[in-house]
Image (cartoon, helix red, strand yellow):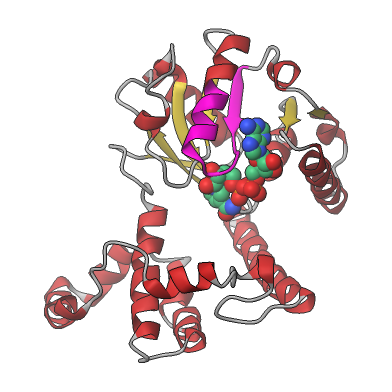
């Protein structure tokens, strides 16, 4: 995610410094950014990105630091303690965590007012919305600052009113995941069936109409009747299913090991990535032309 976030800030004229603890990954990020730059055809503003090999130099004079390291609580809080030593007291520390509570992440900071979450979606340069999740201690001036910045970058910031694990989008996706796995576990459908049903039914509407808009169209009286039938049989499991545990234990992790519920090879992976990307660009261009 880090390279995509860096690319977007640079695209809108901001000076960006990218740091990664792994030199190999810093080079991978550089190559990915080079590809994004060459396919975008606007090279000038991208000269604004520099790749730096140590943390202190990378954040010197930074007004905003966006942390996008692995989803590991201890690694993130250790990084913030080091950042506070190097940063000006007014500089912001922002995390791209997908699931960790911002108040937990900021509890050991000397200046927790500077901290909050901006949850991007992958790839950040093709998905317009960012969830902003403050803590009770976050200074609202800092939130306004980032909201204004996002608006200038044609991004749609949504301020989450109260922090909650997974924020909004990942909670909704988790609800779909829980029931999808449940249906496969009960041998009611194959993973392929579930994917096809989502893609070719309600998934088609979701980019133009949200769940509340769709339910309003259906009518709450009918929705109530349907939910009375379905809710008692929905999965209410409160931990990831054993089917997922089995996949993890068997190292069937998906793309990275070429097998999960499906088998993958380079061509098949590229085909899916390209299809997603093509669709996202189409939607982004539709937004721009509206
Ligand atoms: N991948 C997604 O779709 C997605 C979407 C939204 C949010 N996020 C969140 O963004 C964060 C990054 O996810 P990702 O998928 O890009 O992970 P990733 O594993 O691809 O990248 C993480 C990078 O952080 C580097 N790193 C680890 N510790 C570091 C440290 N102390 N200092 C500097 N660099 C360090 C690693 O070398 C690695 O290159 C996570 O918190 C994740 O939950 C990811």
Farthest-out residue, bottom: 188
Q: Which residues are magenta?
A: 63-80
Q: Residue at x 67, y 69 (%)?
A: 257
Residue at figure coordinates x 83%, y 46% from the top left: 37
Residue that protrudes farthest toward the front in the picture: 249
Q: Which of these two is toward me, 218 or 34?
A: 34
Q: Is residue 270 left or right of residue 135?
A: right
Instruction: Residue 217 in the image: state x and y as whole percent.
Output: 27, 72
**Quarter of the image where one finds residue 189:** bottom left
Q: Is residue 206 one of those drawn in magenta? A: no
| Residue 260 vs residue 134, the one in the foreground | 260
- The percent position of residue 31, horizontal first and vertical second, equals 85, 47
Q: Does 32 sit left or right of 241 as displayed?
A: right
Instruction: Give residue 53's position: percent from left, percent from top.
Output: 80, 27
Q: In this figure, what is the number of numbered marks?
A: 0
Q: Is residue 232 left or right of residue 13?
A: left
Position of 202 with respect to 97 (left or right) is left
Note whether 15 is above or below 6 in the view shown: above
Q: Position of residue 144 (x, y in %)?
A: 44, 24
* Quadrant of res 58: top right
Q: Between 248 and 186, which is closer to the camera in this rendering? A: 248
Q: Is residue 80 above or below residue 247?
A: above
Q: Quadrant of the C terminus?
A: bottom right
Q: Quadrant of ligand 1?
A: top right
In this picture, is 245 found above or below 127?
below
Q: Quadrant of residue 20?
A: top right
Residue at image location 80% in from the left, 45% down from the top: 33
Q: Is residue 5 visible?
A: no
- Which residue: 34% across, 40% down? 160
Q: Is residue 254 visible?
A: yes
């Amino acid at each position: 995610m880090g390279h995509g976030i860096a690319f977007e800030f640079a695209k809108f004229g901001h000076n960006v410094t990218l740091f990664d603890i792994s030199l190999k990954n810093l080079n991978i990020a550089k190559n990915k950014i080079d590809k994004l730059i060459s396919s975008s055809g606007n090279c000038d503003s991208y000269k604004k990105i520099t790749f730096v090999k140590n943390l202190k130099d990378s954040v010197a004079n930074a007004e905003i630091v966006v942390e996008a390291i692995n989803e590991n609580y201890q690694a993130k809080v250790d990084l913030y303690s080091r950042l506070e030593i190097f940063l000006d007291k007014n500089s912001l520390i922002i995390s791209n965590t997908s699931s960790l509570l911002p108040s937990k992440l900021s509890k050991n900071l000397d200046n927790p007012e500077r901290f909050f979450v901006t949850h991007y979606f992958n790839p950040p340069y093709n998905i317009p919305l960012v969830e902003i999740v403050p803590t009770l201690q976050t200074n609202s001036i800092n939130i306004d600052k980032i909201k204004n910045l996002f608006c200038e970058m044609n991004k749609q910031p949504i301020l989450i009113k109260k922090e909650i694990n997974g924020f909004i989008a990942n909670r909704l996706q988790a609800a779909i995941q829980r029931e999808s796995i449940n249906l496969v576990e009960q041998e009611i459908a194959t993973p392929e069936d579930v994917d096809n049903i989502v893609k070719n039914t309600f998934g088609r509407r979701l980019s133009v109409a949200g769940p509340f808009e769709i339910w309003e169209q259906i009518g709450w009286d009918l929705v109530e009747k349907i939910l009375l039938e379905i809710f008692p049989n929905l999965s209410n499991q409160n931990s990831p299913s054993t089917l997922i545990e089995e996949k993890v234990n068997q190292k069937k992790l998906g793309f990275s090991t070429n097998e999960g519920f499906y088998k993958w090879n380079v061509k098949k992976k590229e085909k899916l990535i390209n299809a997603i990307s093509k669709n996202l660009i189409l939607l982004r261009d539709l937004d721009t032309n509206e």
